[in-house]
Amino acid sequence: MTSKFSSIPMMLAATAAAFAPHAGRMPVWVLIWCAAAWGWGLLIWKQKTGWPPRWGLNLLAFAGFIGALASFGFAFDRTAGVTILSVMLSLKPLEARTYRDRMITVFLVYFLILSNLLFSNALPMFFYMLGSVALTTMLLVRIQDPEGKSGRHAALAGGTVLLALPVMALFFFLFPRIPGGIFRLTETTTARTGFTQEMSPGSVSRLVLSRDIAFRVELAQAQVPPGKRYWRGVVYSDFDGRNWQSLPQPPAALSPEPGVETVVQQIELEPHRQRWLFALDLPFDVSTAAVAHADYTFKAPEPIKERIRYRALSAMQRPARTPAPEEAARYLRIPAAGNPDARDLAARWQKESRSPAEIVERALAFFGRQEFVYSLTPPLLGDDPIDEFLFQSRKGFCEHYASAFAFLMRAAGLPSRIVGGYLGGETNPFGGYLIVRQSDAHAWAEVRLPERGWVRIDPTAVVAPERAEGGTEAAVPPEERMSRYPFSEMPLIGDAARNLLLGLDAANTFWNRRIMGYTAGAQRRLLSRLGLSADSWKEPAAAFCAALLLISAAGALLVLLPRPSLGKKPDSVQRSYLKLCAKLAKAGVVRRPDQGPCDLIEEVRRLRPDLALLVSPAIERYVRLRYGPGPTAAERSRFIDEVRRLSL
């Protein structure tokens, strides 16, 4: 097969590998388009169809360009750009007749691989891109040596990539860093939605269905046992009869009571498209830019669209602050009508209780005595959701219990509110930190009591005490546990899978902190540890050039130093010639080691003239194949077949 065909399969493989990570964000028709183009390329390789005309390719390229733009409403963004590149690149193997076209295809594949950094810079993507680069480099070698063996091409490509890794590391660690990093664009595409400004029945339970990570925490865990790891985020204060809203608040200065124990946390918050910062209840200070509010919540200036890391300080005891009258009134408001049974129950508690604390105790006892069920699949509620939940369904998730409790407290004359956040967290033994997932999402209530201030009340803990210690998986009914947590009934498989995922998370966390988090400040600290001045780039530049020369010299030595030869294996033509010589030896003509093919013909004519006419054409053909210009695959096959059929 000629060289213009031999590289097509590898070209298609390299293009498909570069395209694969983008497949999930492409329109379906683009996937079909690329598959059809690659199938056409395979038919060309098999020589079952010819090359398409140039005008036909131009027409396809124009149609693909317009179709890709139309798929995104003629708005050009990174996804639209990569889609256009993919559509155009899928057509390149169909015109790879010349060396120039094949080389252009290689560089376009490299560019498509690089475009993955626009969407992900995670550790698995780095290794995938490294493999894709190695495959494309193998294609580059194949284009230069179309008749060579694939194993040799793979070894050369792999060696080239390995030799490039030290140079890549040198550029990464010592080349001047761009302020803010070059990967800020990537993070905006990975944001996930968590808690929002509104909490309605079912909103938290929908979050719990996700295993996405909300944040990671480095925490002295002995200070805070699992049942007390309440991570505060958003406070909901306004109730319209069904939904709770978080209302804007003015900034406030926060500080702990003198002598109160404080807990320090290092939090790595994943992007969630909201402004809330999360910290252990009760936070009073964070190290990142944020606005503090009187309800002990913190808001970033802008929605969080990239991973951020900050230190938070939390007090383990609440100050008994007296709220302003207008603030207290806000936490007492309920709709004028609706949920009459819950209002009557709260009024009875208020009348029969001697203190506000007794009202709280009566409410918790009510949840404990009735047959309430903690469930991820509660029934839909009607026009009076509080009444229906408390007196009919009695089946709900944490937001149902927190909402009903806060409504009862307000109806009984006690200021109350709902806090949205997370409860618990999973220890990662490989990284020494806690992982708090969306599945740990939780809502609880707070009640304002005289002389005690705001007190955290979690009615869910009365109904499902397992939730605080064992998480959602331990608290839901057995039938839901089987359907949503299948590994819970297979401890060996579940533990192995969990440890594998925790190990991968620890590796990815190290990657994000040490590599993706390698900022200009981190580079200055590294230079200082190396004894180089970071105030001027003269010393770092000199060290950079010296290291680059050393790496280049080492690479040159590895390439140029002689290596012990094990003998070059003969190719298919040589092997057939040796078979021919073996047949001649059996016929009485033994080739000497110093005897070339032309001399061998003379030897045959001298010793076995009867075989000369039969053997001479084959040996002459071998000479042309071995020493002539550019033999084709068909000519090589013809010679091999001729020797195979030759009988002496």
Image: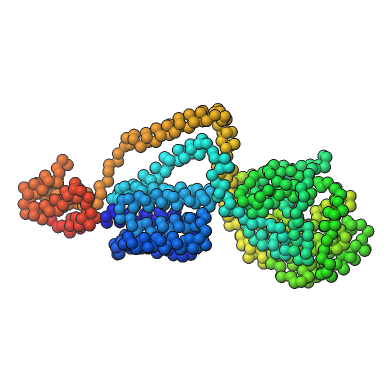
Residue 286's image quarter? Answer: top right
Give x and y (percent) for residue 194.
66, 56
Label tally? 0
Residue drawn at point x = 41 percent, y = 48 percent: 134
Q: Observer-nearest residue: 412 or 390?
A: 412
- Using the rendered image of the protein, determine whether residue 489 is visible from the camera's viewpoint: no
Which quarter of the image is occupied by the N terminus? bottom left
Q: Observer-nearest residue: 582 or 541?
A: 541
Q: Observer-nearest residue: 623 or 246?
A: 246
- Using the rendered image of the protein, determine whether residue 553 is visible from the camera's viewpoint: yes
Residue 51's image quarter? Answer: bottom left
Above or below for 93 versus 217: below
Q: In the picture provided, is 399 more to the left or to the right than 413?
A: left
Which quarter of the image is occupied by the C terminus? bottom left
Residue lying farthest to the front in this orientation = 74
- Colour scheme used in the picture? rainbow
Residue drawn at point x = 49 percent, y = 51 percent: 116
Q: Observer-nearest residue: 44 or 248?
A: 248
Above or below for 34 versus 147: below
Q: In the picture provided, is 631 more to the left or to the right than 280?
A: left
Residue drawn at point x = 42 percent, y = 40 percent: 163
Give x and y (percent) for residue 146.
30, 50
Give x and y (percent) for residue 526.
56, 33
Give x and y (percent) for residue 153.
35, 47
Above or below for 200 versus 261: below
Residue drawn at point x = 35 percent, y = 37 percent: 559
Q: In the picture provided, is 241 more to the left or to the right than 35?
A: right
